[in-house]
Amino acid sequence: MFKGATQLNLDGKGRIAIPVRYRDFLLGYGAGALILTADADGCLLLYPQPAWQPICDKLLALSALNPQIRALQRLFIGHAEMVQMDATGRILISPALRSYATLDKSVMLVGLGNKFELWDAEKWQTQQVLGLQLMAAGMPLSLEGLAL
């Protein structure tokens, strides 16, 4: 579904324009309704609403008596907001979510299959360096035999 990294500008009202190559799909799959939520890495996650619903249902079905599960529910569900693409393909990112992810003017929209990550551009660069360092330290056994 979604792949690639695109640099975007956040406008003065806190909106970004979803790249044209994704708009028709998002309009057809969920009528342009999207869910924005926080991620533990300090970015935002952007899901088409139909892709988000099973994740939300699974999180809500877990026992809130466990403090780790409760923290996970607070992070993902507690920050979740429904946004709607407007006629020009823009979405509004609330001040609370912009603050959480420290989004300023320049942001990166990164496609990861069924969702996007939305990063502050500088934090994205730092994340890239950290990712390369992790890979240099050794790959998980589950990736053994993966040929690219």
Image (cartoon, helix red, strand yellow):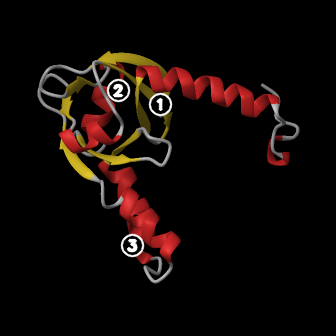
Is 3 left, or right, of 73 in this rendering? right
- At label 2, which amino acid type do we have? Tyr
* CB atoms of marks 2 and 3 within 8 Å: no
Disc 3 from disc 1: Cα separation: 25 Å
Disc with the residue nearer the chain's start (2 vs 1): 2
The numbered mark, 2 or 3, whose residue comes first in the sequence reads 2
Give whichever of 113, 8 is nearer the camera: 8
Q: Which residue is mark 1?
A: 111
Q: Which mark is residue 60?
A: 3
Q: Quadrant of residue 45?
A: top left
Badge 3 marks a residue whose secondary structure is: helix
Quick one: quadrant of the C terminus?
A: top right
Crowd class of label 1 (few under 14; some 14 to 19; many from 20; radius 10 Å) = some
Image position of 148 (left or right of 29): right
The label on residue 51 is none
Kindly report which numbered mark, 2 or 3, lies closer to the viewer in this rendering: 3
Q: Which residue is mark 2?
A: 22
